[in-house]
Image (cartoon, rainbow, N blue to C red):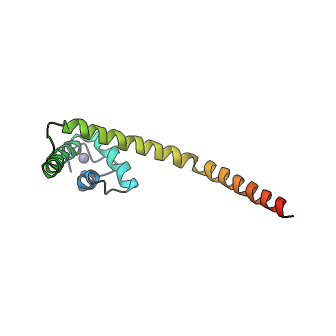
Amino acid sequence: MMIGCSDTIMECKEAQKLVTKYIADDITEQELEQFMEHIQICKDCYDELEINYTIFSAFVQLDNNEDSSDDINAMLLEKLKASRKYIRRKKIFNHYRILIYIAAMIVLAMIILVQLGLWL
Ligand SMILES: [Zn+2]
C-alpha cells in the first residue's frame, strides 16, 4: 500500500487487482464504482491502470494488425469517461428506482382495471 492511500475506500492492493478486470470489462458494478473512486484520488493506481492499458492496447493492436498510431492515452480517458457516465446514470437510476417501481405498479393496476372493466 502506498502512503496517502490508506484513507481511501478501497486499498491499493485491491484496486490494482481490479486494473486488469477493468481493462477486460470483467468488473462488477460495485467494484467499478469503488475502483473509479480510488483511481480518481490515487495517482499510483491510476499509473498502474495507464501502464496496463497501454500494454493491453499494444497487444490488441498487434493482434488486429491495426495502425498503432492511435493515442492510447486518449482511448483510456474515453473509457474512464464512459465509466463515470455509467456510474452516474446508475446512481440516478437507483435514486428513482422506487418511483419507477411505483409508476410501473400504477400502470399495471390500470391495465388490470381496464381488463376487468372489459370483462365485467
Ligand atoms: Zn491506490
Quadrant including the C terminus:
bottom right
Percent x, y for residue 29?
40, 54
The residue located at (31%, 57%) in the rendering is 26
Percent x, y for residue 20?
23, 54
Reply above or below: 103 against 82: below
Q: Nearer the viewer, residue 1 or 86?
A: 86
Percent x, y for residue 63?
15, 52
The residue located at (14%, 51%) in the rendering is 59
Percent x, y for residue 19?
24, 52
The residue located at (40%, 54%) in the rendering is 30
The residue located at (48%, 45%) in the rendering is 91
Q: Nearer the viewer, residue 12 or 108?
A: 108
Reply above or below: 104 against 71: below
Q: Nearer the viewer, residue 101 or 60?
A: 60
Query: Residue most toward the bottom?
Result: 119
Viewed as shown, does residue 54 lie left or right of 77? left
Viewed as shown, does residue 92 lie left or right of 119? left
Q: Nearer the viewer, residue 53 or 38?
A: 53
For the image shown, how many numbered marks are present on the structure? Answer: 0
